[in-house]
Image (cartoon, grey):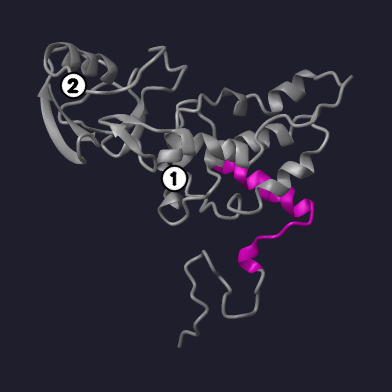
C-alpha cells in the first residue's frame, strides 16, 4: 500500500516536499502506518501521538484534505497525509497549537464565577454534555475557512466552550461571556458546518454558534453586518456588495 506524506521543515531552511512510502501492513490505522515508516524506513519523519484511543487529540492531521485522528483513520491506497491548516508547522506533521489554544483565553472560555448551593439535575448535565467532550484536537480550527480572511477569529472550539458555560446553571454571569464573543466571534462565522463534519466527538460548533447568536439577540446584541441596514454596506458578509443591479 502506497501513501504520500507532505514533509515540511523550517530547519535549517524552509523546505517542503511530498514523499511517497510503501507500507506492507494489513488494514492499518494511519498511526500504525506512520510508526512503521518511522521505525523501518525513515527515522526523520515527525508526527505527534499520545493515547492511541481517540481521546487525547494529539494525532490530528489531514488526509486527502480532511481532518482525521491518525489513531482512528484506516489507511487507503494513495492517501495524501498533511499537517493541520491554519497553524504554524514545526516539522512535517507536527504543528504549533499555541495561538489556537490562546483563543480560549481571549473568549474567557472557562467557568468564571460559580454560584454555590446549586445542585445540577440530570437535565442540567445533559444540556452541555456533548460540548464537554471536546478533546482540543484542533480539527475544527484547521477546517474553518474564516481564518483565510480573519486570523483573529475566536474559532469553533472556543465558541463551543463558551456555549458550554453560558448554559451552565451555576455560572453567575453568562451575559459577560456573551459579550466577549461579539467581536471576532459568533457573527464572523459563515455557518459552513465544516467544523461539525470533521469533529471526532460529534460536536456541532455550528449549532452552538447559532444558539449563541440567538442568546445574544435576547440580550440586545445584533449582527454588526446589519448595522448599516439600508445603506450601501447592506449584505456585508453575505455576497452582496450593495451596488444596484439592473
Distance of label 2 from label 1 (alpha carbons): 30 Å
Q: Is residue 107 visible?
A: yes
Q: Which mark is residue 243?
A: none
Query: Which residue lies under the disc numbered 2?
Result: 44
In the drawing, does residue 50 fall left or right of residue 234? left
- Residue farthest to the right? 117
As drawn, the residue found furthest toward the front would be: 12
* Residue 34 location, quadrant: top left
On screen, 66 above or below 178? Answer: above
Magenta-colored segment: predominant secondary structure = helix
Q: Which residues are magenta?
A: 206-226
Whether residue 196 is visible, yes or no, is no
Q: Please state if 44 lies on the left or on the right of 86 as rendered.
A: left
Residue 105 x, y percent position in the rendering: 61, 37
Q: Quadrant of the C terminus?
A: bottom left
Against 105, residue 154 (above or below) is below
Q: Which residue lies at the image location 11% right of the left edge and 24% below the top edge?
A: 21
User: In the visual, does 181 lie left or right of 18?
Assistant: right
Please give the residue where the numbered disc 1 appears in the rendered image.
Answer: 144
| Frontmost residue, 162 versus 213 | 162
Q: Is residue 50 or residue 55 the one in the foreground?
A: 50
Amino acid at each position: 500500500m502506497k501513501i504520500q506524506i507532505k514533509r515540511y521543515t523550517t530547519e535549517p531552511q524552509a523546505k517542503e516536499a511530498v514523499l511517497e512510502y510503501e507500507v506492507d501492513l494489513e488494514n492499518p490505522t494511519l498511526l500504525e502506518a506512520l510508526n512503521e515508516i518511522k521505525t523501518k524506513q525513515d527515522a526523520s519523519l515527525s508526527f505527534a501521538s499520545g493515547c492511541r484511543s481517540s481521546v487525547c487529540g494529539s494525532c490530528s492531521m489531514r488526509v486527502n484534505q480532511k481532518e482525521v485522528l491518525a489513531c482512528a483513520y484506516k489507511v487507503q491506497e494513495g492517501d495524501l497525509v498533511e499537517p493541520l491548516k491554519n497553524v504554524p508547522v514545526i516539522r512535517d506533521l507536527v504543528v504549533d497549537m499555541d495561538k489556537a489554544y490562546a483563543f480560549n483565553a481571549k473568549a474567557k472560555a472557562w467557568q468564571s464565577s460559580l454560584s454555590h448551593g446549586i445542585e445540577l439535575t440530570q437535565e442540567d448535565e445533559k444540556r452541555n454534555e456533548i460540548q464537554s467532550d471536546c478533546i482540543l484536537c484542533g480539527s475544527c480550527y484547521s477546517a474553518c475557512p474564516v481564518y483565510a480572511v480573519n486570523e483573529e477569529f475566536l474559532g469553533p472550539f472556543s465558541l463551543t466552550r463558551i456555549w458550554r458555560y453560558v448554559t451552565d446553571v451555576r455560572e453567575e454571569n453568562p451575559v459577560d461571556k456573551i459579550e466577549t464573543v461579539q467581536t471576532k466571534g459568533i457573527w464572523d462565522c459563515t455557518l459552513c458546518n465544516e467544523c461539525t463534519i470533521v469533529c471526532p466527538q460529534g460536536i456541532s460548533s455550528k449549532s452552538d454558534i447559532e444558539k449563541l447568536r440567538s442568546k445574544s439577540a435576547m440580550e440586545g446584541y445584533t449582527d454588526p453586518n446589519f448595522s448599516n441596514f439600508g445603506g450601501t454596506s447592506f449584505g456585508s458578509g453575505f455576497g452582496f456588495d450593495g451596488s444596484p443591479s439592473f
